[in-house]
Image: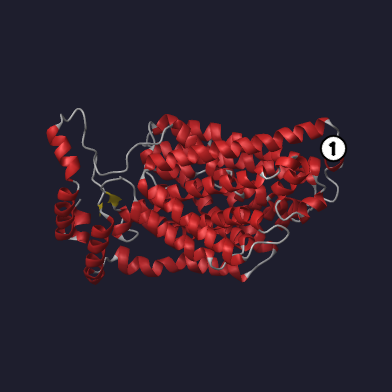
Amino acid sequence: MSEYSIHQGDMAEGSMRKRKEPQNGCIDHSVDSQTTEEQPVRATVLQKEVGLVSGISLIVGTMIGSGIFISPKAVLLYTGAVGPCLLVWAACGVLATLGALCYAELGTMITKSGGEYPYLMEAFGSILAYLYSWTTVMVLKPSSFAIITLSFAEYASTPFYPGCTPPVVVTKCLSAAAILLIVIVNCSSVKLANYVQIFFTVAKLLIILVIVGAGIVLLAQGNTETLSNAFEGSSTSVGAIGLAFYNGLWAYDGWNQLNFITEELKDPYRNLPLAILIGIPLVSVCYVLVNVAYFTVMTTTELLMSPAVAVTFGDRVLYPVSWVIPLFVVFSTFGSANGSCFTAGRLTYVAGREGHMVKILSYISLKRCTPSPALIFNGILAIFYIIPADINTLINYFSFAQWLFYGLTALALIVMRFTRKELHRPVKVPIVVAGLMVLVSCYLVLAPIIDKPELEYLYCTIFILSGLILYYPFVHRKFSWTRTFMRPITMHLQLLMEVVPPEKTE
């Protein structure tokens, strides 16, 4: 606790607790008046409230967002034909499962929240973990949150503007409103966020079932023209296939979500690997079947011309009730955004706890036991990312940095097999799988850059390394003037948000 008190000052913490106790008197008095068995006092830490069903719905619900309703076009565009397109979707599913199995080993070996962060810290030390948290907290997580809510806004506003695209200002305002609502839900209660996640996951599986069912009926009726000469005109460029994988894997992104909340999982040794082995193959099957369903109705040219593939499918197949598709796509993207926000807050919280972010971000709500400062910070950044929005360029540069860290995490698994042999590994994947993930990550990072070098990749790298400018004075040296400057700010924010440092439970 010394780090908190030095950094924070006993005064701030003391005044916080003194002021909170009378306000929160209801809890204290109820404990006095009732027996402690009836109402045990909860420690001020994030509670273990995520079970197996919540875990699966977090993985499935975050993976199936807008990707399958927007990205099929991009995958088909870069592969050039139906056959390779379906193969890329299936291969992406296998890759996501293999990657997640590596994460299952890491998550059961090091049971700390924060996704890749604790693994990079353990394998490579503080600097690399800091650069990961810097890039992910400042860019990757909020930009991903922004992208998902923008597609939510696009689908939600389209019915009100028949025959034309909705004004940009409408989609952006709607997207900001969605971010605000999701942050409020996540700050209010972990259980509420879980219920929202489960509800929207069920909704999106329902609409996928409808699309796949319609596709099977159409196949049985003989609509196989597009699927018959599947490999005609396929692309052979290495970079193009790399970009097809990029866009396919963007739709699968989220397979590592459960590792962000390991500390909140009930029985992580059982539920983490189990949720991964149920959730990701389920998503892979859904994705391939949905694509087959699309091709029963549309030719490749029509699919590429369609502004929203799933909606075009609905208009042709489910005509009188075709409005259900955009409605359920809205549900799907909202659920995915909720999952993204839920996990992003945990990374920011863990980075703050380790001293790699401002201390206030590691504080948790006294009454609700949620990391509200971290969640609010992520929401504010996401709203900034809405302002300059072109979804596709964002996805491409986003994937470049994301896969760099996926590759480093798989490498961390290999490194720790030799450097940390003493650690207990309830799940152990063949080292070849981790090696394959490292190679795939290298390919996905380098192929598009070699194929089509662009300055944006350089800007991305410069941004990642620019975190070191802040690392030296604030993290490495911990200059006293930074504490003097931050102490009153932290104290006022603490009182405003009713948050306290997490208690040490070990």
Where residue 453 appears, x then y in whole percent?
A: 66, 67
Tag count: 1
Q: Residue at x 70, y 35 (%)?
A: 212
Where residue 14 appears, x then y in whole percent?
A: 14, 55
The quadrant in which residue 168 appears is: bottom right
Q: Which quadrant: the C terminus?
A: top left
Q: Which secondary structure lies at badge 1?
A: loop
* Location of mark 1 (residue): 224
Which of 354/32 is in front?
32
Which of 205/259 is in front?
205
For disc 1, the neighbor class at 10 Å (few under 14, some 14 to 19, many from 20) is some
Where residue 141 appears, x then y in whole percent?
A: 48, 55
The quadrant in which residue 44 appears is: top left
Residue 30 visible in rendering: yes
Residue 428 visible in rendering: no
Residue 173 sits above or below residue 216 on the image: below
Q: Is residue 356 left or right of residue 172?
A: left
Q: Is residue 372 left or right of residue 28?
A: right
Instruction: Give the amino acid type for the residue marked by disc 1 in the picture.
Output: Thr
Where residue 316 appears, x then y in whole percent?
A: 78, 44
